[in-house]
Amino acid sequence: MKDFPLKIFAGREALAHIRKNGLRPDDISMILAASGGPKWLALASMDAFLLSEWFSKRLKPLHLLGTSAGAWRMACYAQKDPLSALGRFKDAYLSQTYSPKPTPGEVSRECRRILGILLGENGAKAIVNHSFMRYHTIAARCRGLISLDSRAFQTLGLVAAMLLNAISPNAIRPFFERFLFYHPKKKPPIDHFPHVPVRRIALSVDNIRKALLATGAVPTVISGVKDIQGAPAGTYRDGALTDYQFDLPALPDDGFVLYPHFSARPPIPGWFDKKLRWRKPSLDNYRRAVILAPSEAFVATLPGGRIPDRHDFYAYSYPERRARWEKALSTCEKLGEAMSDIHSRRLWASLAEPLPWS
């Protein structure tokens, strides 16, 4: 449909299902939520639609997997009042303020403030004990120079990892170990994790806050997280280092994966793949996935012709940055409205397209 603000891309099995049956809430068994810092703001209205409409009467188990900011979004989904949690997260995120040259410690304190508001008094307990939401997140335990507190040493280690990753994604193994922090009732429907070894740690009320802080701990920007209960000693950082926008075989047996994403371009597998345009996720890994993303024409209508991103922290001081983000949020309400339109008019089959890297 011309000028429709939302694109729908589906892997081969999901596309066949949609063209035959459309798509219903109970067809979804898992949601993915990518890293991307402030980019998540473009998805806030879609999150609100999903929570207020699509999944409002949900009883069937629903897996949630996110890294970094995506993990914090999904932490809202798994609380007792998810819409209120999403609102608290949005308000706390918009109100971030920093000194002109913040240290990792300063940024970490602000992250703890935001997370404290997001979770509230009982959020950790609610997530771990949720009746049907199965919350999971990923963090990277760092080795060598990247595990150190020094920004200079971290940068050297990151450059080395970036160069080796250009040769093969397997080559970053000496630098990172992937840790999956999973819901204690059920692991996500992922049989194996490619390229980087994985260790699985059950989430608990005692470790979920640190796991959430760790998955968002951007190297050189935010302090690494140590002493996560139930996990080995070490320095844990951003889950995006191994799983930026995902290249995982998320293949539930009895449903599909919904992936609200902020770009109509192919997802970027790992943090070090951002400039490797030839590296795209496996089509087979996405065969049961449905990606929802703003069209490039819609993105062009946002302030600066792009969705909010981390560069805004450097380009705009508060409150100008907040004003730009609020304008973007207001414009992106059209994405939530588009989802409602798709649902009410049953437009899934007419709008669904093959994956953009098919």
Image: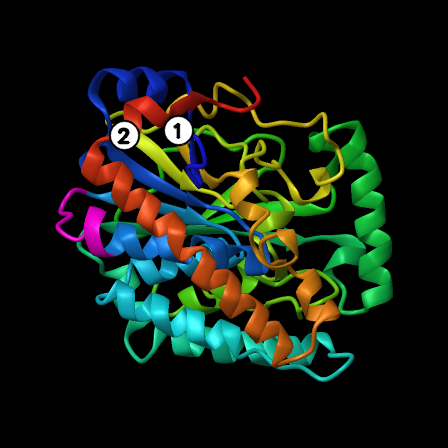
> Secondary structure under badge 2?
loop
Q: Is residue 67 left or right of residue 19?
A: right
Tell me where the magenta segment starts and ends, as one range: 52-60
> Residue at coordinates 51% horizontally, 51% vertically from top-left?
67
Q: Position of residue 320 (x, y in %)?
A: 63, 77
Question: How many neighbours does mark 1 have within 10 angstroms: few (below 14), some (14-19), or many (20 or more)?
Answer: few
Q: Position of residue 291 (x, y in %)?
A: 43, 34
The picture quadrant where one finds residue 279 is top right
Cβ atoms at labels 2 and 1 below 8 Å apart: yes
From what the image shows, is residue 11 above or below residue 239?
A: above
Q: Position of residue 4 (x, y in %)?
A: 41, 37
Which quadrant: the C terminus? top right
Is residue 54 magenta-colored?
yes
Q: Nearer the viewer, mark 2 or mark 1?
A: 1
Which amino acid type corresponds to the residue marked 2 in the rendered image? Leu
Which quadrant: the N terminus? top left
Which amino acid type corresponds to the residue marked 1 in the rendered image? Met
Is residue 67 magenta-colored?
no
Q: Is residue 330 left or right of residue 317?
A: left
Instruction: Kindly identify which numbered label has been placed on residue 1.
Output: 1
Is residue 294 visible to us here?
yes
The picture quadrant where one finds residue 14 is top left
From what the image shows, is residue 310 above or below residue 100?
A: above
First reached walking from the N terminus: tag 2 or tag 1: 1
* 121, 24: nearer the viewer: 24
Q: On the image, numbered disc 2 is attached to which residue? A: 347
* 276, 220: nearer the viewer: 276
* 249, 280: nearer the viewer: 280
